[in-house]
Amino acid sequence: MRTLPVTLSLLMLGSTALTAPALAQDLRIVEDPLELTIHMHWPRAQGYGVGGDTTQIYPVELAAREMTGISLVDQTAGKNTTDAAEAMNLLLAQGNMPDIVGGHLIQQPVNQYGPEGAFLPLNDLVKEHAPHIQAFWDSHPGLMEAISAYDGNYYYIPYLPDGEFGRAWYIRQDWLDKLGLEQPQTVDEYHDVLVAFRDQDPNGNGKKDEIPYFARQWEEVNRLLTLWDARSSGSDTYHDFYVNGDGKLVHPYAQEAYRIGLGHIADWYAEGLIDAEIFTRGSSSRDYLLSENLGGSTHDWFASTSGYNAALADKIDGFNFIPFLPPASAAGVRMEEHRRIPIKPDGWAISYMNEHPIETIKYFDFFFTEEGRNLSNFGVEGETWNMIDGQPVYTDAVLNSDSPVNSQMYLVGAQIYRGYWQDYRYEDQWTSEAAREGIALYQANDLLIDQFLGVAFNQEEQAVYDKYWPSLRTYMLERQQAWILGSGDVDADWDDYIATLNRMGYDQVIEVMNSAYARQYGG
């Protein structure tokens, strides 16, 4: 058995995901059955099996075996941790890599260590043996370059989301109606509406217990920055860098507009317009605050958030939580900062120990065929969905289950973090009419902005980034939360804050970010 190169013994990598299709003879990749090992580690499952339990084989995996002749055998390290990078470190420390390595947040490690030999470059393999993947790259210019490493090669097949809009601004329309208010069109009007929610008892219980603005991910409070023409992120990843008007990468939390915007957010928090427990309430806040008739407005996903109208119809009379257009900013700009990123840093790669790279890339390609794409999105035909009038349609059992459709898909091996092309029809089927109307409203108003798709560092750049960025990010977020909570004043502290960032290496990080960006995108 080959051993891991010494230079790679301390790798920090991501995780894995796999599955496959089911249908006809022409999809078979090998004449004799072939087993490939896989490390599969992602937030919902640590191990390639149902819920991470490798004794329970995914139905999608069983179908894929029948269709392709290839079986995936679990070889996941770090099953006792939910941290994908930690799990990958454990795998690599063993010195025995599986054939396929992938899953959560794999892009950075494979781009860092692929050029050193840990993973196989896929450019030629795809061109020669994966026509469906190559057709995707040809029809989506720029995406292959966006996932490439500093040497110009790419080393993983990503999870490719479908659709444009993800999140939207939501408001209790029934509360507006009760108070005789219109939907807010500007940041000042939004402020006044939140004040009315705080003071005028729209839930009618005689108590001043309404929470005007809430969020189940605390990071969403930063979306309020856009109302003062600042940014909270450059992509669908929180706290990410973005490209400014001069074509240079900067970080949103080191810009003058951030100082102004965060000062206003701190004021709103002090006024009681923002959930006092926004940093601690956690992911259950949406369920709790809406079901208890306490929450007034948020920024969250279209499909799941609109579902509360039906879920709470019998509990709260007239409940109507609907998307509304982003309020115009202080400068008059309507912006929806969040959008579905076209490529995820998740997917799968071929390790240097794989003795069947051609068969493996053909297996990856299988998920880009019509049959494989249906399998990876909807599960097994005849079990979770049927083809009706040429469209994959979930069964009534799936759509009417008490369990969310995506959770059901995870359990059968669909919608997991493999390298595949998502199909928006998967989500559209369980998106309410109110959410569809909201998406149409957003589409009609040209709200989306360009996303930063990431950069690939060379070794020197990576060393600078790794040396400075983790502590910089921690410091930024610590100060951000402290300012919002009222510990310190962002205006009074700003000069010292910027000076501290520079002492901690912010300028060096920005320099290597822009060096990598110019090389990768020709800037």
Image: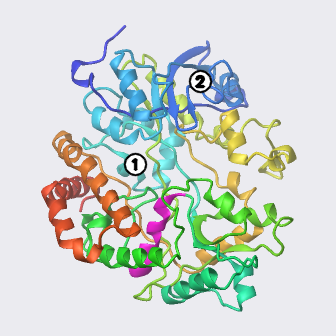
Front residue of 462 and 253: 253
**Tag 2–tag 1 contact (CB < 8 Å):** no
Vertical comparison of 96 with 119: above or below: above
Give residue 487's position: percent from left, percent from top. 33, 67
Q: Is residue 18 magenta?
A: no
- What is the magenta segment's predominant secondary structure? helix
At label 2, which amino acid type do we have?
Ile
Q: Read off the magenta span.
A: 217-229
* Residue extending farthest front: 207
Q: Is residue 449 depicted above or below 138 in this figure?
A: below
Q: What residue is disc 2 on?
A: 29
Determine which residue is flagged by label 1. Answer: 144
In front: 17, or 187?
187
Which element carries disc 2, helix, strand or loop? loop
Q: Earlier in the sequence, mark 2 or mark 1?
A: 2
Task: Residue 445 in the image: state x and y as whole percent.
Answer: 56, 81
Task: Kindly report the distance in space between the C-alpha atoms of the residues bearing marks 2 and 1.
Answer: 25 Å
Rendered position, 512 above or below 177 = above
Give the label, 2 or 1, closer to the camera.
Answer: 1
User: How many neighbours does mark 2 have within 10 angstroms: few (below 14), some (14-19), or many (20 or more)?
Assistant: some
| Dot 1 amino acid type | Met
Q: Residue at x 54, y 41 (%)?
A: 132
